[in-house]
């Protein structure tokens, strides 16, 4: 039993270290056409990352069912850990370049697994609820996540 205890401790330390690394991982998200760039934690949705930085775009249900937040994934990779309504994603005609959903994504449920570029819909914009609306100009946010970790 004594021979296994150090191995168990080592395995436990390894799991803790891997959890810390995963928790520390962030992805850069750029929203077009404004060029607004912000960081999203590895386990949060694009909309949750926006909200954490004091920003808003159009969304409603936050369950992936209404399509109000629907946007185009230009570059990067996302996952939907909680699932979304496939009918909402399948409104675009898929092409070989755009993938099975025509490049559509739902930022309210999309969790990045890489850096992303997302084009918002034509009637959408990024609103800085603590400042002004980000229109056609490029805006880069350099926000310390520890100072804005509230909802």
Image (spheres, rainbow, N blue to C red):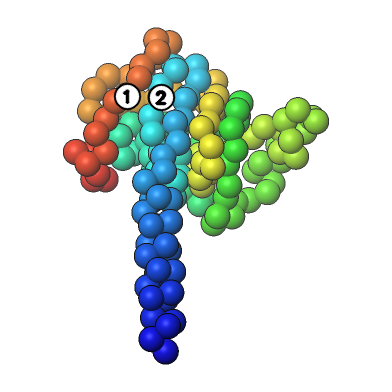
Report the front residue among 38 and 54. Answer: 38
- Farthest front residue? 3
Quadrant in which the C terminus is drawn: top left
Q: Are marks 2 and 1 in contact (CB under 8 Å)?
A: yes
Q: Earlier in the sequence, mark 2 or mark 1?
A: 2
Q: Residue at x 38, y 34 (%)?
A: 39
Q: How many marks?
A: 2
Report the front residue among 88 and 97. Answer: 97
Report the front residue among 110 and 3. Answer: 3
Spatial CA distance of label 2 from label 1 is: 6 Å
Q: Residue at x 54, y 42 (%)?
A: 113
Q: In this figure, which residue is indicated by the disc labeled 1?
A: 141
Q: Which disc, if any, is residue 89?
A: none
Q: Secondary structure at mark 2?
A: strand
Residue 121 seen anywhere in this rendered image of the structure? no
Report the front residue among 99 and 94. Answer: 99
How many C-alpha atoms fall within 10 Å of the one at disc 1: few (<14), some, or many (≥20)?
A: few
Residue 91 seen anywhere in this rendered image of the structure? yes
Q: Secondary structure at mark 1?
A: loop
Compared across the picture, whether 34 is left or right of 102 comes to left
Q: How far from the left and from the top, in percent, is residue 83?
A: 59, 55
Q: How far from the left and from the top, in percent, is residue 99?
A: 74, 35
Q: Which disc, if any, is residue 37?
A: 2
């Amino acid at each position: 039993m004594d021979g296994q205890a150090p191995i168990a401790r080592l395995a436990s330390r390894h799991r803790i270290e891997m959890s810390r690394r995963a928790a520390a991982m962030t992805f850069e998200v750029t929203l077009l056409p404004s060029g607004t760039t912000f960081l999203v934690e590895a386990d949060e949705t694009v909309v949750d990352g926006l909200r954490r930085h004091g920003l808003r775009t159009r969304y409603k249900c936050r369950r992936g069912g209404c399509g109000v937040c629907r946007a185009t994934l230009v570059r990067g990779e996302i996952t939907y850990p909680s699932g979304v309504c496939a009918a909402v994603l399948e409104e675009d005609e898929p092409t070989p370049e755009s993938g099975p959903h025509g490049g559509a994504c739902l930022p309210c449920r999309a969790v990045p697994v890489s850096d992303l570029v997302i084009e918002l819909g034509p009637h959408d914009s990024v609103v800085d609820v603590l400042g002004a609306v980000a229109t056609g100009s490029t805006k880069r946010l350099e926000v310390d996540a520890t100072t804005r970790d509230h909802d």
